[in-house]
Image (cartoon, rainbow, N blue to C red):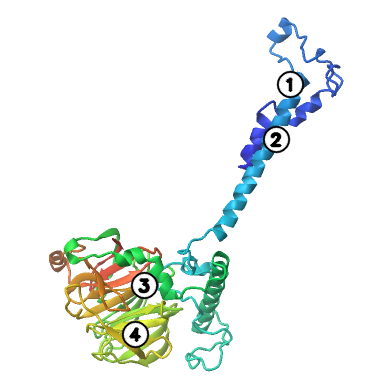
Amino acid sequence: SVLLLLLYYFLNLGGSPDEMDDYDHDQNDGIEMNGTAIGGFVGGGDNFDDEEADSGVPNPEPLSTIKPLVRSQNRMFLCAIATVMIAAAVYVIGGVYQADDNDLPEDYNVQKGVIEDGNEFPTLEGDYPAGGKKGHASANWFDHNSQDNNSTNGLLHQELNRTQNAHDAAMARWNRTHPGEPLPGKCERIESKYRLWHNENITLADGVQYTVIEQMQHDGDAFTQGLTYHNGKLYESTGLNGKSSVRILDAQTAKVEKKIDMAYKYFGEGMAFVNGLLYQITWKKRTGFVYNATDLSLVKQFSYTTTKGEGWGITYARCNDEFIVSDGSNYLHFWDKETLTQKRKIEVFRQNGKPAKEINEIEYWKGRVIANIWYEDVIIVINPKTGVVEKEYDFSKLWDSKERKQTSKAGVLNGISVSSQLNVLYVTGKNWNRMYKIRLK
């Protein structure tokens, strides 16, 4: 804008002020400053004859005409500069102070030191206390004093710093935009932000209620049990004894970048990402594992219990800073994030009033638990407070089951993950040779 204004200044309305130097300030002299006569003019008139005019040499404007034009030009230029400066100030100040109630801390990018969208990461408060305060539940396996950026401890320190910076930035902005008001709880903010979607009623009878954005190739030998995302990477847990594994995938292509195999006795199930760590559960061994999300090195092992004594799906709900676990029953189990022990559980019922049995892979998204059901090509949306299934999406047309059986060993739809885009999800299935990016309606 400034460059355009400068061009305007020098090319329009009689030229630049430097042209004033071509004339003596006494217009009655008719003499240039360099002393060369230009054909005197008095009182603003010119004395060029027709022959001089025909020669192509322009008659100079009298100063009585030039001066008002230059003054007008200067005023317009100054007004334009002032307008640009005011607009810039309004843009900057308005971006800070003119936020509505939906402009909440979740909207900021964690990599830049602020929290962003409704994905499952990161939490608003730091998961690990700065300086490694004594008595912290994770102190027995997390060395707070380690500064090795390539180690699990170093990665956790990085996550802590980003999360703490995000928290500080979010609180500062909230105090500017809502002075004197207490910061709403995390659950309250999510409920407010996604209220319209929460209130929509979608049933299987509504047919296709999603849009396919992209189809990618996927390893057809992967018996997908768990799928989650963080920072450009997908993390996949596969099942079956002797074939179970933990994988890192390129989120753009679904290509396997790193893989570790599990011991034969373990049947891999769901997996969740939290602050640089992957939490995986197994089917019947009541054993879980925590891995470094960068190199898949084992950090620790833990035991757990559920209603059926099995593990099917797991996700992290940042709203209440807890894990949510399914076990193939119609219950959701809520675990303390530090102790990995059950705090409560709720019963889930389908829209037809029947128990939602065989809840499989789950993901926390927009304040709700979205889940696959074993033997069904559906995704249900569960209110984690009440257990009510608010929506049921029919995915039977995504990849027709008859075509699956004819072309591959592919099984049922299973595997849901958030993505880098708030409204876009990854979905796949057991032994599917394809993965989709979809958008729910």
Identify residue for label 4. 334
Q: Can you say whether 130 is above or below 215 in the image?
A: below
Q: Residue at x 54, y 68 (%)?
A: 174
- N-terminal label among 1 and 3: 1
Please give left or right for residue 373 compared with residue 62 in the image. Answer: left
Asked whether 27 or 415 is in front, the reply is 27
Q: Residue at x 43, y 71 (%)?
A: 189
Please give left or right for residue 211 compared with residue 191 in the image. Answer: left
Please give left or right for residue 52 compared with residue 387 in the image. Answer: right
The amino acid at mark 2 is Arg
Identify residue for label 2. 75
Res 67 → quadrant: top right
- N-terminal label among 3 and 4: 4
Residue 22 location (% of width, % of height):
80, 24
Instruction: Identify the secondary structure beneath mark 1.
Output: helix
Asked whether 88 or 415 is in front, the reply is 88
Residue 376 location (% of width, % of height):
18, 73
Identify residue for label 1. 65
Asked whether 434 or 76 is in front, the reply is 76
- N-terminal label among 3 and 2: 2
Q: Give the distance between the C-alpha atoms of the residues marked 3 and 2, in whole angstroms.
A: 56 Å
Q: Give the distance between the C-alpha atoms of the residues marked 4 and 2, in whole angstroms.
A: 69 Å
Do the residues bearing badges 1 and 3 touch, measured as CB atoms within 8 Å? Answer: no
Q: Give the distance between the C-alpha atoms of the residues marked 1 and 2, in whole angstroms.
A: 16 Å
The amino acid at mark 3 is Gly
Q: Give the distance between the C-alpha atoms of the residues marked 4 and 1, in whole angstroms.
A: 84 Å
Do the residues bearing badges 1 and 2 touch, measured as CB atoms within 8 Å? Answer: no
Identify residue for label 3. 367
